[in-house]
């Protein structure tokens, strides 16, 4: 049922079971003609959809290259003046709000620089990998009291390891994603936390084990020791202010760091008391890739939030050495993306859905390839769609 017939039935009871989809980007083709969609080359198309066909209609619109920018009940649409009575009427899209751009200008950046770092103290250094896991990952918390270093969720800080390199020059700083909310793990606005994996690898020529300079320094840092900190930096991974947003998080290993901060801000009881003006009511979905169950960082906290806030937080693991994908291969984040492609693409059509990716650089190509393949099966150009999401500040990637 579409526009021309729907608007003659104006009762609240009937209207509450019909919804208006405002769609942009539909392309004219044979399939669109058969569906009688009022396609236009630019502007918005308004389509009336019965409640029991909403998901099916989303998928059709997606296959036709359209993007749903707004959904509202028919009766509300009529009250709000949405042009539901004129099929195919072209409405000029609203200009992009500058609110987010203005907010980004307020983001704290480079309060402390390498030439004049803040000297904090290590308050905590604990192991996150449980018995049976691989490698070493530490959760570190630093005292920031006595300085002016403040930050937002999604930002990073720089750490300057002591000593000199092989040329006798001071070590350069290394950046690490912040794993705590703006209020810190202690809730007093005076700490910052990191999630650090000790880098170890075999030299390709000598076979000698090489240890990362800064990661080894941090993983071995004693509580009470001084540490030189710079920053904060970064505006790419900021969490939107929209309390009703959908936040899709793709993480591998220590890429969980910014998402721990996100989830604590959304669901931690201490944070809720500290942030009375922010009450998350949307959907957060974390797809977390790790090699073994014992490598699930912050496992107890994640699963507690998933249990207590099941209506708003969805937790999916991709455990490569223990789980198999449908084709029998190891289970990685990209396999989960493929498995849940229908849901993910429907969510990404919503104008307030943000997708975040964080972890080792190697995670990006296979995930991108998977999105490309799944998009092609839906008659979509993934690169164009991704660029559009990026333009709308809804696609966020930080890999290292």
Image: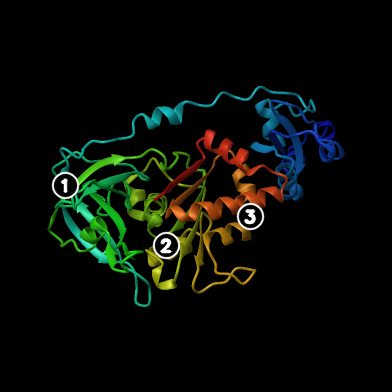
Q: Which residue is mark 2?
A: 302
**Nearest the eye: 353 or 318:** 318
Q: Which mark is residue 170?
A: 1
Label 2 sits on a secondary structure element that is: helix
Q: Of the residues tagged 2 and 1, which is closer to the observer?
A: 1
Q: Determine crowd level at label 3: few under 14, some 14-19, many 20+ residues with C-alpha closer than 10 A.
A: some
Q: Is residue 350 visible?
A: no
Instruction: State yes or no: discs 3 and 1 in contact (Cβ < 8 Å).
Output: no
**What is the spatial separation of the Cα atoms under label 3 and label 2, in whole angstroms?**
23 Å
In percent of the image, x 56 and y 58: which residue is there? 334
**Nearest the eye: 183 or 147:** 147
Q: Earlier in the sequence, mark 3 or mark 2?
A: 2
Q: Determine crowd level at label 2: few under 14, some 14-19, many 20+ residues with C-alpha closer than 10 A.
A: some
**What is the spatial separation of the Cα atoms under label 2 and label 1, in whole angstroms?**
39 Å
Q: Earlier in the sequence, mark 3 or mark 1?
A: 1
Q: Is residue 122 visible?
A: yes
**What is the spatial separation of the Cα atoms under label 3 and label 1, in whole angstroms?**
47 Å
Q: Quadrant of residue 386?
A: top right
**Which residue reaches farthest right?**
34
Q: Which residue is mark 3?
A: 341
């Amino acid at each position: 049922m579409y526009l021309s017939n729907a608007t003659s039935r104006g009762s609240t009871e009937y209207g509450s079971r019909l919804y208006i989809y405002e769609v942009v980007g539909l392309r004219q083709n044979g399939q669109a003609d058969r569906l009688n969609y009022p396609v236009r080359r630019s502007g918005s198309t308004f389509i009336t959809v019965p409640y029991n066909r909403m998901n099916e209609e989303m998928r059709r619109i997606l296959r036709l290259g359209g993007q749903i920018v707004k959904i509202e009940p028919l009766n509300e649409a009529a009250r709000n003046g949405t042009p539901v009575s004129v099929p195919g009427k072209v409405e000029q899209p609203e200009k992009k709000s500058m609110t987010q751009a203005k907010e980004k200008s307020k983001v704290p950046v480079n309060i402390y620089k390498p030439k004049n770092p803040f000297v904090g103290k290590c308050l905590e250094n604990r192991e996150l990998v449980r018995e049976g896991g691989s490698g070493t990952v530490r959760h570190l918390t630093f005292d920031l009291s006595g300085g002016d270093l403040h930050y937002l969720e999604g930002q990073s800080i720089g750490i300057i390891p002591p000593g000199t390199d092989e040329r006798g020059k001071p070590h350069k700083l290394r950046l690490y994603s912040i794993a705590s909310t703006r209020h810190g793990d202690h809730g007093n606005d005076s700490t910052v936390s990191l999630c650090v994996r000790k880098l170890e690898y075999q030299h390709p020529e000598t076979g000698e084990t090489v240890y990362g300079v800064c990661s080894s320094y941090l993983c071995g840092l004693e509580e009470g020791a001084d540490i030189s900190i710079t920053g904060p930096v970064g505006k790419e991974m900021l969490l939107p202010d929209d309390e009703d947003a959908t936040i899709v998080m793709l993480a591998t290993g220590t890429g969980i760091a910014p998402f721990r901060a996100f989830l604590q801000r959304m669901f931690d009881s201490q944070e809720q008391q500290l942030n009375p003006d922010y009450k998350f009511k949307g959907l957060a979905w974390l797809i977390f890739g790790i090699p073994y169950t014992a490598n699930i960082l912050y496992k107890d906290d994640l699963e507690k939030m998933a249990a207590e806030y099941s209506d708003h937080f969805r937790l999916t693991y991709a455990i490569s050495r223990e789980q198999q994908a449908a084709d029998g291969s190891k289970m990685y984040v990209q396999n989960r993306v493929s498995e849940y492609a229908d849901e993910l693409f429907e969510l990404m059509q919503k104008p307030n859905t943000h997708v975040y990716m964080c972890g080792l650089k190697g995670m990006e190509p296979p995930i991108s390839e998977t999105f490309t393949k799944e998009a092609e099966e839906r008659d979509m150009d993934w690169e164009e769609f991704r660029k559009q999401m990026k333009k709308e500040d809804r696609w966020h990637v930080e890999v290292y």
